[in-house]
């Protein structure tokens, strides 16, 4: 069964460093998403991406964040200058369509900012 | 504004008991979608069910069943004859029509005791 994959599973970085989190969505899906979950809290939407551009973003997704689909398979989230409060689990998701279509989530990348 | 409330923060039951997880949602849209996801201790988000607002039929899948009631804006989840492997955090979530994001509740942590 096709699934969303994410690398790395755990990333440790120093405050102020740039990190890139990588995702490979399910191959026939057209919509891609990033969510984050601070430890013990709920899952929060960051951004959605379709046709090589951002279609929606939350207040959390400020100028420090960017997303890219550099090739036909990868979907990346970059945090330019990490802060302590960026420590969280980051989930990538993908769906075939919009309008409430089911989003399938990857296993997550745990980001720890020291 | 859309909102999902899971009032039960944590529930513990003994194996083989039935357990119901409550979910109440708020939305102004007439077309919307409801989801349940499971987050086991390993951390991934596993899709369980998707329901659209026009389909109020209850659904059963093995030991899992869902009760959708528009009149009370609730979408409750029941596990029958619970097993230790059901121990996880369960998230109820909502997506409005033509809206990219899924809004998650805070989750209910379910402990199934042997």
Image (cartoon, coloured by chain):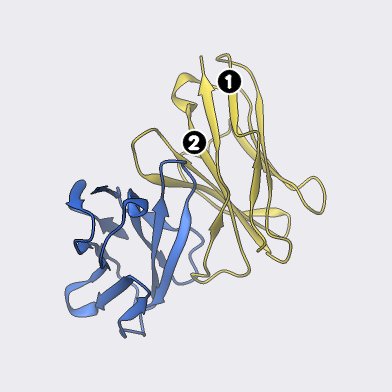
Chain colours: A yellow, B blue
Q: Along the horizontal axis of the image, is B48 left or right of A81?
A: left
Can residue A107 be seen here? The reply is yes
Return the x and y of residue A114 as percentages of the image width and height. Answer: 51, 14
> Is B77 rendered above or below residue A3?
below
Return the x and y of residue A104 as percentages of the image width and height. Answer: 55, 59
Tell me how far mark 1 sits from mark 2, CA to CA.
Answer: 12 Å
In the rendered view of the protein, which quadrant contains the N terminus of chain B? Answer: bottom left
Give the structural element (helix, strand or loop) at label 1. strand
Along the line of sight, the residue nearer the viewer: A113 or A2: A2
**Which chain does tag 2 point to?**
A
CA neighbours of label 2 inside 10 A, class few (<14), some (14 to 19), many (20+): many
Give the total number of marks visible in the rendering. 2
Q: Residue furthest front?
A: B114
Residue visible at 40% across and 55% down? B38
Give residue B58's quadrant in the image: bottom left
Can residue B1 be seen here? The reply is no
Residue visible at 64% across and 57% down? A3
CA neighbours of label 1 inside 10 A, class few (<14), some (14 to 19), many (20+): few
Give residue A79's quadrant in the image: top right
Residue visible at 51% across and 61% down? B100
Residue for badge 1: A12
Along the line of sight, the residue nearer the viewer: A66 or B61: B61
> Is B104 rendered above or below residue A13?
below
**Which chain does tag 1 point to?**
A
Return the x and y of residue A77 as percentages of the image width and height. Answer: 64, 39
The answer to whether tags 1 and 2 share a subunit is yes
């Amino acid at each position: 069964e096709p699934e969303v994959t994410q690398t790395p599973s755990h990333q440790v970085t120093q405050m102020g460093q740039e990190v890139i989190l990588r995702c490979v969505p399910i191959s026939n899906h057209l919509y891609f998403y990033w969510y984050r979950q601070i430890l013990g809290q709920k899952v929060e939407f960051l951004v959605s991406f379709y046709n090589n551009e951002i279609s929606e973003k939350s207040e959390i997704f400020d100028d420090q964040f960017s997303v890219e689909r550099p090739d036909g398979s990868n979907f990346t989230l970059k945090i330019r200058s990490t802060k302590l409060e960026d420590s969280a689990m980051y989930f990538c998701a993908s769906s075939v369509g919009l309008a409430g279509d089911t989003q399938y989530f990857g296993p997550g990348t745990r980001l720890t900012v020291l | 504004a859309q909102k999902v409330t899971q009032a039960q923060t944590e529930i513990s039951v003994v194996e083989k008991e039935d357990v119901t997880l409550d979910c109440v949602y708020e939305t102004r849209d007439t077309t919307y979608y409801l989801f349940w996801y499971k987050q086991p201790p390993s951390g991934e988000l596993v899709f369980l069910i998707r329901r659209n607002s026009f389909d109020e039929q209850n659904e059963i899948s093995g030991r899992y069943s869902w009760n959708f009631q528009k009149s009370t804006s609730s979408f409750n989840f029941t596990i029958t004859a619970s097993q230790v492997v059901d121990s996880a955090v369960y998230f109820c979530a909502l997506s409005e029509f033509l809206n990219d994001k899924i809004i998650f509740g805070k989750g209910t942590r379910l402990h199934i005791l042997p």
